[in-house]
Amino acid sequence: MSAEHAHAHESHGAGHVSPISLYVTIFLALMVLTAVTVGAAFVNLGQFNFLVAMIIAVFKASLVVWYFMHVKYQSRLTKLTVATGLFFLAILLGLMLVDYGSKGFVPMPPPIDSESVIGGSPDAR
Amino acid sequence: MSDAVAHADHHAAAHAHHPAQQHHFDTMPQQKEAAVLGMWVFLLTEILFFGGLFVAYMIYRVWYFDAFAEASRRLSLFWGGLNTAVLIGSSLTMAMAVRGAQTNKRKATVNWLILTMILGTVFLGVKVIEYQDKFANYEVPGPSFNWLAHEQHQAAAGEHAAAPAEGEHRKLSLSPEQLQRTTQIYFSLYFTMTGLHALHMIIGIGLMSVITWMAWKGRFDGEYYTPVEMSGLYWHFVDIVWIFLFPLLYLVERHQ
């Protein structure tokens, strides 16, 4: 029984030791991508500024998760668990924004005026 | 009774269990995988914890974009950029600490952990400088929040300086009164998100000081270094949160 288990667990590399050069490469990539993010923010890309910033951030986060957090070397169960978390985050972000978006908040109404909010003078209308 | 002890001795001798292996695990890798999985489940709750704040940020950003853009320009790109570099650097030193434990290098592990804590403290120190600046400029949401205090201060200083204030050429869709109200939403989110992030870093440094002490005592080796790896996962997670906070808070609209 225990021998079988030992054999079954040999295949996954929980104790995988990454070379120092890999860590340094990831670190440099993260630094360069940070500089790119700042640089891109000063270029007028219209609505794509936000998209570019988020794509870079997601890529940076993926590098950290995959290499620094060793998910690359974990079991499929752990990988699936990580993916599940991202899936639920996507539901949280996606459905909330769809909900707000579909309520006519995009394009956005003007900022709150004290007259038009609840508690303001109704006879103003 | 003595049979049982004899059996246990025989069992231990036959399998040569690592002292850190708990009896309900068959092997060290199995024990480690359980710990990694459990840590990730905890981190998922953390992702959704911060996720709620990111949702709030997104909705208000779309809603009051101009206010967010204006308020974001009040943050220092220098300090924000520096802190991003410091935190990424601390992720590297943390990864090196875990590697040190994996390769049985006790002193290297301790040194990398100490360096990680120093970088974490530098980050928090910069955060203190930034917060102090916000308090000094009446940019903390609440009764003393004054959006115009900063510009009045700039205008007073500008009497001697030839260069006009950066914001003067931008056409604003919001009146000063509207900005006074809506930029407070931005700064509320700024303080909540960075404050919660800073709290995580303080907890991380606390965890690490215990781990460093354990590493110094020689509790870890190439087969058992789970606490180092777990605090590493936590620290990298905090780094990831900042990777998103930096562009969202500091770089809303810098090209104008």
Image: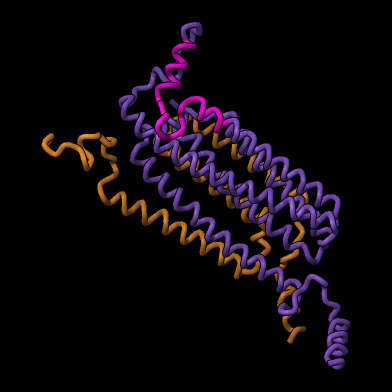
> Where B13 falls versus B31 (above or below)?
below
Question: What residue appears at the point 47 percent right and 16 percent down from the top-left corner?
Answer: B154
Q: Colour of chain B?
A: purple
Q: Which colour scheme appears in the figure?
A: by chain
Question: What residue appears at the point 65 percent right and 60 percent down from the top-left corner?
Answer: A72
* The image quarter in which residue B149 lies: top left
Q: Viewed as shown, does residue B248 lie left or right of B179?
A: right
Question: What residue appears at the point 82 percent right and 62 percent down from the top-left corner?
Answer: B219
Q: Position of residue B173 (x, y in %)?
A: 31, 27
Q: Colour of chain A?
A: orange
Q: Position of residue B194 (x, y in %)?
A: 53, 42
> Where B135 falls versus B119 (above or below)?
above
**What predominant SS class does the magenta segment belong to?**
helix
* The image quarter in which residue A24 lies: top right
Q: Which quarter of the rendered picture does the N terminus of chain B lie within? A: bottom right
Q: What range is drawn magenta here? A: B130-158
Q: Viewed as shown, does residue B59 lie left or right of A74?
A: left
